[in-house]
Image (spheres, helix red, strand yellow):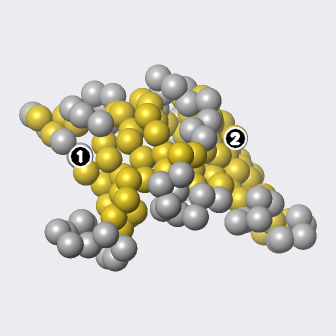
Amino acid sequence: MWIKYVYRKDKIVELVEHYYDADCSQPKIKGIASSLMALVELNEEGRLRNIKVQYNIFGKKLKKGSFKDGDGTILFYRADGTLLRSVEMKQGRPDGQCLYYYPTGQILASGKFKEGIITGIWNEFSTLGKIIATTNFD
């Protein structure tokens, strides 16, 4: 993946473009196939404000979640369109429940953020749904 930012006077001023790249080891170069992954807006502090649109690698539009104006739940996806993570956001940063998913949709890990910082107990799950690891971040 590569990301395009537009800065003026050290501030991001336009939509931020995220791309899937055929060779993800470096930014887009003429002649390398790529496709749009997401268009996002950041506020003046560089925090996530809105997700305008998200696509899988084949160009299919994906659900954005309830995230708007810096608050709500964001859904993040793998290139194939399977759900990777859902995270609650407040004022443009993670704050609340966060879930990671296996490609099958089962929960891989769960925990919480507080004002952008990992906090509390996080659990990792097997594909059978059993807790296989627990970490306390307090």
Tell which circle, 2 or 1, labels the residue nearer the N-terminal end.
1
19, above or below 93, in the image? below
- Label 2 SS: strand
Picture coordinates of residue 9, whole percent (x, y): 9, 34
Numbered tag placed on residue 76 in the rendering: none
Quadrant of the image occupied by residue 19 = bottom left
73 or 92, nearer to the observer: 73
Numbered tag placed on residue 97 in the rendering: 2
Picture coordinates of residue 85, whole percent (x, y): 63, 52
Asked whether the viewer can see residue 117, the reply is no
Give the residue drawn at x 18%, y 42%.
6
Asked whether the viewer can see residue 54, the reply is yes
Q: How many marks?
A: 2
Picture coordinates of residue 56, whole percent (x, y): 52, 56
Relative to 15, 100 lies left or right = right
Give the residue drawn at x 36%, y 33%.
41
69, above or below 26, in the image? above
Look at the image and tell me in which quarter the N terminus lies: bottom left
- Label 1 SS: loop
Relative to 27, 74 lies left or right = right
Give the residue drawn at x 50%, y 61%.
58
Q: Which residue is mark 1?
A: 5
Please name the amino acid that badge 2 sits on: Gln
